[in-house]
Image (cartoon, grey):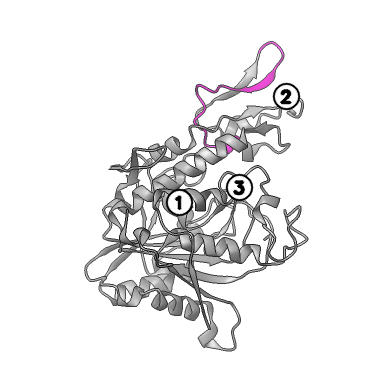
Amino acid sequence: MSEKTKSNTKPKVYTIGLRAKGPDGSHLAKLTKLAEAVGMDKFNWSNKLVALKTHFGEKGNSAFPRPTLLRPFTDIIKAGGGKPFLAETATLYTGSRSNAPDHTETAIRHGFGLEVTGAPVFICDGLTGRDGRKVSITAQHMKEISVASGIYEADALVVVSHFKGHEVTGFGGAVKNLGMGCCSRSAKLAMHTSLRPTVMTSKCVKCKTCFEWCPVQAIGERKPDGDIVINSSKCQGCGECLVSCRVGAIRINWGEDARLVTERMVEHALGVMNNKDGKAFFINLLLDIVPLCDCYGFADAPIVPDIGFAASTDPLALDAACLDLVNAQSGLEDSALTGGFKPNEPKFPHVHDEVDPTWQITHGAKIGLGISDYERIILD
């Protein structure tokens, strides 16, 4: 446990809005100001290999972090003598990012080229997601995790996350980008093994679309009735079938399974931070706050207006502050929200009603990932 988690001092979360009256109010200028406030300009980057962990988005998605917004951070790192690289890892499910060549191509297609971002793309867990370093942790569910080698071996870490909803963990921000995004494929599998989807035969139309998306061929027809079934012994719990089903016929035990996945993810975040204490910065982009994560090949309409940017050296405090900022907004009517439209009403439970978005915060505080209480400092 780090000294900051032992201290009673509230971690600082810096936020900045989107109003602009000139070039000094551009997104890039605001992010530079935010980076300086959190101390990135004073950090010793000299000769350090710096993993700038972001998310390139699944092919067809349009809500992922804008590549141009990464440039202020790579510029600061390089000005200090550091060597930044855009860090990502393979997905557990089949898609455009499940291996290094496809993932790199997707990143370039989405604009994450060296000329735009100022840093090269590096898939940190190897060609097929198997390149990891074992890390021992003390937590409730996990005793050992596998951190992507390129992230483990990096001298410092900058995590730039798109804050949005998530169907299993409630929302995705800095903690999810750490716990899910910085680990190897075996770690992702360890997180998801409690998910056990089933097919509701009364709703299933037997289109077999889910067959194409299952990476381990765990879905098939039951003879002689032809009903679609999932082989639980083969299922790896990636959840891809949940997304591919267009009629909502695939379900899991959300109340139990989703909480366990969330808590395991938080514990993996703790493991990632094992050798990065005092060497990590976290920035959340509160733009295009959509109901689902950027791993889908599409992006739904935002559920609240754009808010701005936030940064901290404590990922838990940062996510707690961003969750409060989202809840403080008026919900957008023409969106996936089914309620919570008034300011200061919870938003994500009205998108994913089986999932409690505070699970990440409470479990993170419990295991010492960070401090959930924070001091917000608003920048002009």
Circle 3 residue: 356
The three-letter amino acid code for the residue at tag 2 is Thr
Which residue is label 1 attached to? Answer: 364
Marks 1 and 3 sit apart, C-alpha to C-alpha, by 14 Å
Q: Is residue 241 left or right of residue 7?
A: right
Disc number placed over residue 201 in the picture, else none = 2
Sequence-earlier tag: 1 or 2: 2
Residue 142 at x, y = what percent?
Answer: 38, 38
SS under mark 1: helix
Task: Determine the image quadrant of residue 10.
Answer: bottom left
Q: Residue at x 61, y 51 (%)?
A: 292
Decide: few, some or many residues near mark 2? Use Cα within 10 Å; few <14, some 14-19, many ≥20.
few
Q: Which element carries disc 3, helix, strand or loop? A: loop
Q: Residue furthest left?
A: 47
The magenta segment is 223-241
Q: Is residue 78 above or below residue 293?
A: below
Q: CA distance from mark 3 to mark 2?
A: 27 Å
The amino acid sitting under disc 3 is: Asp
**Type of residue at label 1?**
Gly
SS under mark 2: loop
User: Residue 126's spot in the image, x, y percent?
Assistant: 33, 45
Main SS of residues in magenta? loop
Marks 2 and 3: in contact by CB < 8 Å? Answer: no
